[in-house]
Image (cartoon, helix red, strand yellow):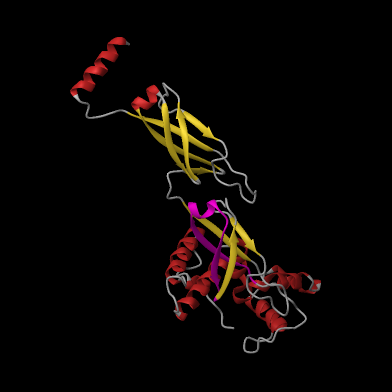
């Protein structure tokens, strides 16, 4: 297997920051995503490479191992353990640090030369974890639903629980890369990016919104219909309602993650709208009212 330069795949160098890596990954993942490049084998291959590069470089520990051991980064721990178990006679060699010759000797003994790569069948290694990002609308996560993802040319059908949070990560066990020599597969980590295009502001399980009231209804009271995520609700407005008044609708917020039939609350703030373009008669009536006050 030829050495893969993950930095080159993302168009970066070793000085790249975590922010640089995240930005480059998102840009390339969108560019080569299978949904945007149907039946494009080259794009599929690029998408796989970009995901693999991000999986390694976006993880602090994995990146350190990759920078130190290169193509053998996944087996760096085995190298360290082997070095610790070597006789004290090698203390002088250890004191001056690990050289590239140390690395190559060790890995060639364990896995064979680069031309051979015949691995010791008695040594089992866990497969590499995969990491991906899934963008959803806020409305999508109000209810549980199924979604099909394409990972390494394989379609994976997953159920997304209602109430999942922006930035939340879930683990799908065994859907990473295959283990070596019968070792366990890696896992798939999915990070959710929730886009809110609604009039509701989400705060955990609670929702917040504002509702306009005309001046007359605020003063005299009445009824209004307001939208929620599961239909419209009729509200009774108390007479002399003040601007900025807040009310709570219990259980009309967002579903609680993995808690069936449990919901947060909906908080509504009333904004009173002052009438404009008054007629002469209306102005006279308001003048009469002001005199009464």
Picture layout, residue 88 above or below residue 233? below
Q: Seen in the image, is 6 located left or right of residue 129?
A: left
Q: Seen in the image, is 2 located left or right of residue 96?
A: left
Picture layout, residue 226 above or below residue 175? above
Q: Where does the C terminus fall, quadrant-wise?
A: top left
Return the x and y of residue 211 as percentages of the image width and height.
Answer: 41, 35
Quick one: 130 or 172, which is closer to the camera? 172
130 in the magenta segment? yes
Residue drawn 59% across the image and 43% down it: 263
Q: Where does the N terminus fall, quadrant-wise?
A: bottom right
Return the x and y of residue 104 as percentages of the image width and height.
Answer: 65, 80
Residue drawn 47% across the image and 33% down it: 235
Quick one: 205 or 92, which is closer to the camera? 205
160 in the magenta segment? no
Name of the residue lying farthest toward the top = 292
Q: Seen in the image, is 111 located left or right of residue 156?
A: right
Residue drawn 28% across the image and 28% down it: 275
Return the x and y of residue 82 as percentages of the image width and height.
Answer: 76, 73
Range of residues picked out in magenta: 128-153
Residue drawn 51% across the image and 46% down it: 230
Name of the residue lying farthest toward the bottom = 116
Picture layout, residue 256 above or below residue 169? above
């Amino acid at each position: 297997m030829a050495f893969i330069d993950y930095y080159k795949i993302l168009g970066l160098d070793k000085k790249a920051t975590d922010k640089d890596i995240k930005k480059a990954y998102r840009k390339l993942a969108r560019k080569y995503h299978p949904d945007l490049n149907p039946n494009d084998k080259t794009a599929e291959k690029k998408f796989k490479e970009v995901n693999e590069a991000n999986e390694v470089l976006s993880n602090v520990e994995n990146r350190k191992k990759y920078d130190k051991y290169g193509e053998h980064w996944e087996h760096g721990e085995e190298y360290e353990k082997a070095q610790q178990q070597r006789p004290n006679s090698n203390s002088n060699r250890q004191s001056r640090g690990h050289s590239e010759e140390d690395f190559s000797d060790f890995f060639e003994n364990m896995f064979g030369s680069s031309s051979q790569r015949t691995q010791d069948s008695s040594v089992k290694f866990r497969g590499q974890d995969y990491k991906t990002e899934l963008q959803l609308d806020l409305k999508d996560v109000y209810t549980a639903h199924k979604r099909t993802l394409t990972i390494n040319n394989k379609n994976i059908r997953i159920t997304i629980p209602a109430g999942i949070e922006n930035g939340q990560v879930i683990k799908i066990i065994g859907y990473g890369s295959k283990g070596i020599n019968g070792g366990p597969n890696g896992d798939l980590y999915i990070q959710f990016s929730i886009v809110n295009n609604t009039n509701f502001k989400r705060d955990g399980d609670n929702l917040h919104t504002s509702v306009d009231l005309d001046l007359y209804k605020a003063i005299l009271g009445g009824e209004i219909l307001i939208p929620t995520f599961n239909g419209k609700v009729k509200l009774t407005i108390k007479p002399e309602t003040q601007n900025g008044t807040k009310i709570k609708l219990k259980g009309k917020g967002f579903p609680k993650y993995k808690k069936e039939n449990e919901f947060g609350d909906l908080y509504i703030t009333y904004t009173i709208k002052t009438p404009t373009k008054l007629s002469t008669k209306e102005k006279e009536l308001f003048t009469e009212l002001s005199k009464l006050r």
